Amino acid sequence: MEKVFYELVIEGHLPVIKGFIFGLLEGSKREGTVIFSQESNIKTETLTELFEEWMHLHESLCHLVIEERLLEMVKKGLESTFLVLKLKLKKVRKIKKASFNFHYEVYGKKYGEEIKNVFKELPPQLKTSSDYQPHEEIYPECKEIETLAPCHEYNLKAHGSVEGPIDVLLLFYKKIQEYELIKKDPIILHFEN
């Protein structure tokens, strides 16, 4: 069964929020997935949030993703510790899915094969967009030309997006961070209405 996740937006400083969340989990002897958006390259700020933070209309906002089974515990914990920690829950949104855009251009056949295999071995819960169509070109006339020349014997290009559940997508996102040739945009969360 697929896990359900929520994004929480908490007003407060990141170290205090992390201490609160992990202290709450440890104290309750419960386990669950907690993802801090800032640390996982998940796009968060809206223009309004940035403006409000810049104008000091509120403190820093921390976006995090938690499993549904932790939601009530965290909400109650924030309410009961507000007078001490001054952490305020600003928003709770149910996550439908997550996605990120990517592109790559590779000039070595060995690396091209590696990257194509990474996307062929995509976890079953994830899917690539229909515009992901790797395009391979081979130019035999460039074989004997110097390495730094603008002519390359092999060229592989592609762009697209990957989408699926946030927990599975994040593991795949971290996996492809090992490949410098794959350029990734931040992860985008898609919410239920």
Image: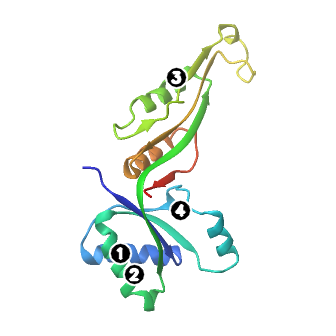
Q: Nearer the viewer, mark 2 or mark 4?
A: 2
Query: Looking at the image, can residue 182 be seen?
Result: no
In the displayed structure, 153 sits above or below 187; it is above
Sequence-wise, the earlier of marks 2 and 4 is: 4
Coloring basis for residues: rainbow
Tell me, yes or no, whether the two marked residues, 2 and 4, touch with CB atoms within 8 Å. Answer: no
In the displayed structure, 178 sits above or below 41; it is above
- Label 3 packing within 10 angstroms: few (<14), some (14-19), many (20+): few
Q: Dividing the picture into quarters, in which one does residue 44 lie? A: bottom right
Task: Return the residue at label 4.
Answer: 38
Sequence-wise, the earlier of marks 4 and 3 is: 4
Task: Return the residue at label 2.
Answer: 78
Task: Return the residue at label 1.
Answer: 74
| Residue 110 - label | 3
Give the Cα separation between the discs numbered 2 and 3: 51 Å
Q: Amino acid at mark 3?
A: Lys
Q: Is residue 140 left or right of residue 44?
A: right
At 65% from the left and 8% from the top, the residue drawn is 140
Residue 118 point in image, percent of width and height:
44, 32
Q: Amino acid at mark 4?
A: Gln
Residue 52 point in image, percent of width and height:
65, 74
Q: Amino acid at mark 1?
A: Val
Q: Dividing the picture into quarters, in which one does residue 49 lie? A: bottom right
Give the Cα separation between the discs numbered 4 and 3: 34 Å
